[in-house]
Amino acid sequence: PAPRAGGQLTASPWSRVRAGVIVTHIGALLLLLGGFLTALTTEEGYITLGEGETGRTVTDYFTRELVITKDDRVVFHTPVRDLHTGSAVASEELPFTLEVLLSCRHCKPEPVGDAAGRFGIAAKFTLTKAPLRQEEEENQSGLLLKTKGAEEDGVYLVFQPVPHPTEIGAAHGVYRLSIRKQERPLPFAVTLKDFEKQVYPGTDTAREYQSQVTITEEGGASWDSLIRMNEPLRVESYTLYQSSFMVADGREYSVLAVVKNRGRVFPYLAGIVMGLGLIAHVIFSAVSHGDKSEVKDAKASSPSSKKDLITRNLPLPP
């Protein structure tokens, strides 16, 4: 009977000759699995440090978050993408609740006509959704929020390009709201000891730059390392690259790209498995070819018919 369609995956039985091919295919599947895991879980960001500064958080390139602070302490934060129109923001750390009237990844400010019930910058402007820019970093996120339980309940506006936070008064003090790029804590600290830049002769164009850093783990262990262009530093599941540099107020800052890749080990594992599979295939194929040659030679040297026996003057079997 013809094999069922579902049995095609197991149509090739396990044998010594096929073992190498099957192991090689397992390695290829591990490589695909690693790529899938990397695409789903990779986190990318950056750290900007001046000489002598220490960083313990990485700033995301793309994700924005709403941050609420009180007395320069973060009491609440959440990604803007999780705040949808009509949703509510509530926390034990906040004496008021927030209703999201509008949430947009890229907003366009427009003058408002009636300022009744609107406070802060919302008394002058409102937000409307705008088409997304091709480059994610060019998008300007914003929120229109309505408070309940504040000293002055009404509509407030939080817009990423606005340099000053939106202030909301409450019984326990003043709370400041802003939208920034999301920050994530690192399981270690990075201290920039020295930044060195080499330029092309006669120009200000950087030819090469590197950062001498100290890595300090949570347990207290620390070590020095050098991060150069095309020579990254790997710490646990993180990889630190020398991305670029910037100059502000006459001071140079090193910009380190930070990538967290949980699937980083899969390409190495897949390469080992595929290599073992190819080696096994070559060895088992050579052994199988030798066995077949011996069988063929044995058949050729043994009498195979009555004609051979008569030719050799041997007695015929009864």
Image: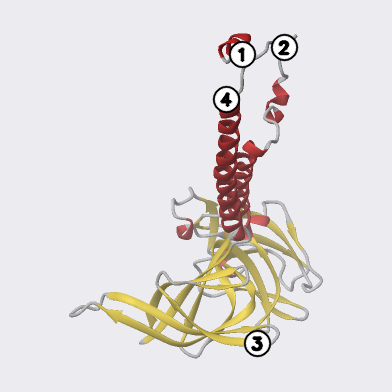
| Residue type beneath disc 3 | Ala
Q: Which of marks 1 and 2 is nearer the N terminus?
A: 1
- Between tags 3 and 4, which lies in front? 4
- Between tags 4 and 1, which lies in front? 1
The residue tagged 1 is: 309
From mark 4 to mark 1, how far is it between C-alphas?
13 Å
- Between tags 1 and 3, which lies in front? 1
Q: Position of residue 56 (x, y in %)?
A: 61, 80
- Between tags 3 and 2, which lies in front? 2
Q: Which of 256 and 1 is in front in this view?
A: 1
Please say if the residues under marks 3 and 2 sit with CB atoms less than 8 Å apart. no
| Residue type beneath disc 2 | Pro
| Residue type beneath disc 4 | Ser
The residue tagged 2 is: 317
Quadrant of image for the C terminus: top right
The residue tagged 4 is: 301
Secondary structure beneath disc 1? helix
Q: Which of marks 4 and 2 is nearer the N terminus?
A: 4
